[in-house]
Amino acid sequence: MQTFHNPHHAGHAGQQEMFRGRMVPCHEVPARLDYVLTELRRRPLGAMTITDLTEAALDKGIARVHSARYLDFLANAWDDWVAMDPANAQRDALPSVWPLGNRHAFRNDVLPANFAARLGLFSFDSGSPLTSGTWAAARGGAACALAAANAVASGARSAFALTRPPGHHAGVDFLGGYCFLNNAAIAAQALRDAGHTHVAVLDVDYHHGNGTQTIFYERADVLTVSIHGDPATEYPFFLGHTDERGAGIGAGFNLNLPLPRGSGLAAWRTALDQGLQAVADFGAQALVVPMGLDTFEGDPISGFTLRSEDYFAVGAALASAGLPTVFTFEGGYAVAEVGTNAVNLLEGFQQVA
Ligand code: Q9C
Ligand code: ZN
């Protein structure tokens, strides 16, 4: 399994996130990726590569998923933030005002001239700091996702996009949940564009993959499945329920498998089998796995109880789908264990594949 890793990831380094009325240290830190790289060097699964995708190919792949208005905002966000106040150069950009979504509240069609308002327009939480290196890091991650999709489209059994910030909470035109560009969606769309007629996304991060769900919600060519903490009590709260099945021609092509906080391996594996059955029934030709390791028992912000050794079986079950598979690195905040857990999953996959 070839790994594409992102040399720009460490430029995205938030200081603090808002949590219940106070600022707390960021959970989504550069060391997360370093632990995975270190473990992959100790237990190699294949070549480790930095992608040499052209800027033009990268722009094209990103624009297949995200809106021009949002990309323009992201590309200029840091400069606009500093232009508001030179002292902002020392502070992360975080939103503090939002337009809501219902049509009897605020408008979202008029682009505010004020950057703080624009930041709110394109965000859904105050836990996702935007920093000087965020755009380069997010772009580098999208490049990894595209390179991984290209490798799989060219015949590789699997490929791993090892990058941060993560992506599965980002939508067509919004950031949130530590995510800016939706790497998994970019990979899925690239697989479609490479000729795979049916692409499935099976999201195993602890949190519902709201961005990916909304991106493909009205499409029948990309099945989205997510196993996650019940949004009644767990982030991102406002999406991820079982009655969200897709809309229009996409009706029937979204499957949510929420589990109560506290769920362990047995319940989780039952959900995984349901998800894999849906992928098989769909007739998927390729699979994208947004790979969050925040289902781990030691995760500081999550509520499932998978143990490190359980991830071998998770990887093996994913391999049993028998599909060309792209993995994207998503959550997992038990920093010292995230490398072991990620490589356990990928090694479990590779041993069966
Ligand atoms: N103090 C991903 O796993 N809220 N995103 C956490 C904890 C945000 C998780 C609050 C969680 C986002 C990619
Ligand atoms: Zn997560």
Image (tube, grey):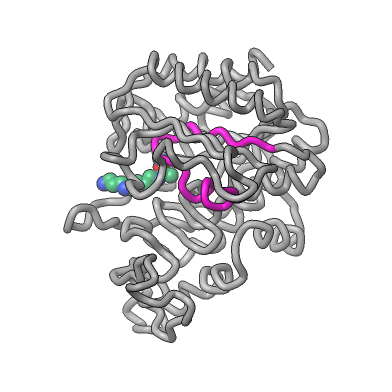
Q: Is residue 65 left or right of residue 237?
A: right
The vertical placement of 168 against 111, above or below, is: above
Q: Residue 186 placed where, x, y %?
A: 64, 50
Check if residue 194 falls in the magenta segment.
no
The stretch drawn in magenta includes residue 201: yes
Residue 154 in percent (x, y) is at: 82, 37
Q: What residue sits 39% from the left and 39% below the top?
A: 241
Task: Spot the residue most to the left.
Answer: 21
The residue drawn where x is 39% and y is 51% is 177
Left-right relation of 49 to 156: left
Q: Nearer the viewer, residue 200 or 265?
A: 200
Residue depicted at x 43% and y 47%: 30
Question: Which quadrant of the structure image shows residue 122?
Answer: bottom left
In this view, 149 is above or below 100 = above
**Does residue 10 lie above or below 101 as drawn?**
above
Q: In the rendered view, does 133 fall on the left or right side of 252?
A: left
Compared with residue 82, is residue 346 higher up or lower down, i.e. above or below?
Answer: above
**Residue occupying the point 39% across, 32% down:** 258
Q: Quadrant of residue 5?
A: top right
Q: Which quadrant is the N terminus positioned in?
A: top right
Q: Which residues are magenta?
A: 199-217
Count of picture labels: 0
Which quarter shows the C terminus?
top right
Q: Is residue 141 visible?
A: yes
